[in-house]
Amino acid sequence: MPTIPSAFNSPDDEFDGSGRKPFVFDIIAPDGDSILPEDVRLVLHVNPKSIQRSYTPNVTRQATMGGYVELDWGQTPAPISIDGVTGGLVHLYSGLISITGPTPSSTDAPYGMASIDVGGTRRQTITYAKFKDLMTLFESNGGIYDQHGRVVMQGQIKATYHGDTFFGWFSDFSYSEAAETPYMLTYSFTFNVSKEMKSIRTIARRSL
């Protein structure tokens, strides 16, 4: 079934000159390589509404005969709090939609109990599919399972956005629906950071 496409095409949108900067999730194996193929990495349908970061100075102090020796190890990343919305639940044939189901009933359903075909439900939108992908990523939390549901390898979640890369795991996830916004879901989660990397922008200089 054809669907309305997402605002982002791939994890590489940030580098194609379009100005788009997607929020991308990946799963990293213990050896540091990505577990997921490039075309399977999760790109959020809509970037988060807010990203709250906090840092704590990592300082150790030691008393010596000549006084205190202080070692400054920089900033220790703290958990990141992210809030967002899914974006509009838009179906190709019925537009904005909040209907979850059911699918059309058979013609022999009792009078007044047959459901109506409205051209699709929100489960058939790219917005809902992307949200379910995010929920699945949270539930697995970097774990790779076999056919029996046993963890065979514990990976690490990698989150990339606007030149910043965070490695860690989810600690909580919640979402809500409100009558005031029937065509989208609101979510929030906390990401515990074990390591952070920042890209440094270089500026070319011309000699005069």
Image: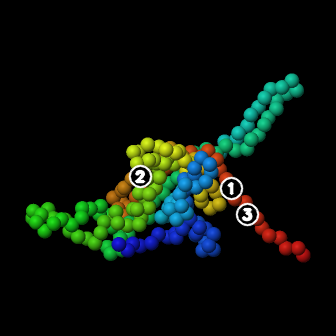
Q: Place residue 24 in its image quadrant.
A: bottom right
Q: Dot 3: few (<14), some (14–19), or many (≥20) neighbours within 10 Å?
A: few
Tag 3 residue: 201
Q: Look at label 2 and name its amino acid.
A: Tyr
Q: Residue at x 56, y 45 (%)?
A: 192
The number of callouts visible is 3
Q: Is residue 134 left or right of residue 69?
A: left
Mark 1 crowdedness (10 Å alpha carbons): few <14, some 14-19, many ≥20: few
Work out whether 7 lies above or below 72. Answer: below
In contact (CB < 8 Å): disc 1 and disc 2: no
Q: Say which quadrant the N terminus sits in.
A: bottom left
Element type where label 2 sits in the image: strand
Q: What is the residue that sits farthest to the front in this orientation? A: 147
Of callouts 3 and 2, the N-terminal one: 2
Judge depth for marks 3 and 2 and give the one in front. Answer: 3
The disc at residue 42 is: none
Query: Which of the two discs, 1 and 2, labels the residue nearer the N terminus?
Result: 2
Specify the amino acid type for callout 3: Arg
Most foreground residue, 17 or 60: 17
Question: Which residue appears at 33% of the width and 58% of the height?
Answer: 179
Is residue 190 at all visible to an observer of this figure?
Answer: no
Residue linked to disc 1:
198
| Residue 194 in picture, x, y percent from top left | 61, 44
Residue type at numbered disc 1: Lys
The circle on residue 175 is 2
Q: Nearer the viewer, mark 1 or mark 2?
A: 1
What percent of the width, then of the height, locates residue 35? 55, 54
Cα gap from disc 1 to disc 2, whole angstroms: 29 Å
Which residue is at the front of the view, 102 or 177? 102
